[in-house]
Image (cartoon, rainbow, N blue to C red):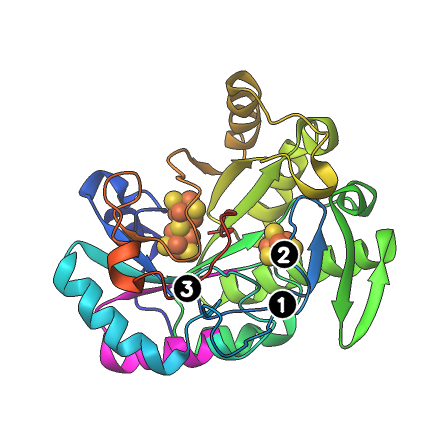
Amino acid sequence: MSSNTYEDLQRSHPCFGGQKNNAGRIHLPVSPGCNIACRFCDRTINDVEERPGVTSKVLKPEDCEEILGKALEICPDIKVAGIAGPGDTLASDYALETFKIVKEKFPELIKCMSTNGLLLSERAQEVIDVGIDSLTVTVNAVDPEIESRLNAYIIYHGKKIEGVEGAKILIKNQLDGIRKVAAAGITIKVNTVLVPEINGKHIEEIAKTVKEAGAKIYNIIPLIPQHELKHCKAPVCAEIDAARTAASKYIDVFRHCQHCRADAVGVPGKSEFGDQIYQRRLNVKETFSHG
Ligand code: CLF
Ligand code: SF4
């Protein structure tokens, strides 16, 4: 069970208000494949291929103890061990296995996990039991029609479910999952990728819905136009501001997101030790991590 309240995290977690205290984080990129197909993401589903001689895409849970020891030596400001990709953290068991190691070997670190939420409802108890302190769920819409314009399909218990049908399941599982985890006292942040022409007018509805489900803080991530949404415009500052203002009627808004990579290490926006820690052993794609 988490021992950190939202108030604790506001002091010590860089993505929950603690950025003023120079708090750092390390991302452990242990989660390879994803189980949904966001239209703005070109990460292939089940991208788990590992060939000898090719840079590893992900880290193994058993490598994390050494990596964390080294990272804390180089950057003692690190207060948070986060897992935010490169795929989804609940699509495999690696993230939860890694958090067990973190809990045992580095009990002082805040355990932070980020997920697309497809499997959050059914895996909520595991998330609670491993002692996650802060959970981020990326919710891009709470209306299945809108979600289907942002997400092409889901792979759910081995079945590909496209369009609005898939979107309905995704949204239901995200909200049920948020309710269960929030009820256990874990602090939840919701991220939304803002695509003005698709969900720009929907932000208020998302913020209201996730707050009612138990989320504490909300983060708007501007679209990086690529893949199927490469024709969409990235939001301009005024659009991001308007979205934040709309959301802030219902929920605290986080305004300092640095769109970290899945293998970022250091104080967000201030220091970056990823190259030193991971020594280019990893081949994590240059897309945001959904932190
Ligand atoms: Fe990492 Fe994300 Fe945890 Fe932070 S990042 S898993 S909540 S420790 Fe932070 Fe980076 Fe923005 Fe994420 S600045 S991308 S919000
Ligand atoms: Fe999966 Fe994240 Fe890519 Fe969406 S953005 S398809 S959740 S890896």
- Residue 102 among those drawn in magenta: yes
Secondary element at image label 1: loop
Q: Which residue is mark 2?
A: 43
Q: Residue at x 59, y 72 (%)?
A: 48
Furthest residue toward front: 53
Kind of residue sitting beneath label 1: Asp
Q: Taking the image as drawn, is residue 194 in sight?
A: yes
Kind of residue sitting beneath label 3: Leu
Instruction: Report the number of discs.
Output: 3
In this image, 16 relative to 135: left or right? Answer: left
Image mark for residue 47: 1
| Magenta region | 95-114
Given residues 145 and 33, the one toward you in this image is 33
Q: Position of residue 211 (x, y in %)?
A: 56, 46
Q: Position of residue 42 (x, y in %)?
A: 65, 51
Q: Taking the image as drawn, is residue 8 in sight?
A: no
Instruction: Indicate yes or no: mark 1 CB to ligand 2 under 8 Å.
Output: no
Secondary element at image label 2: loop
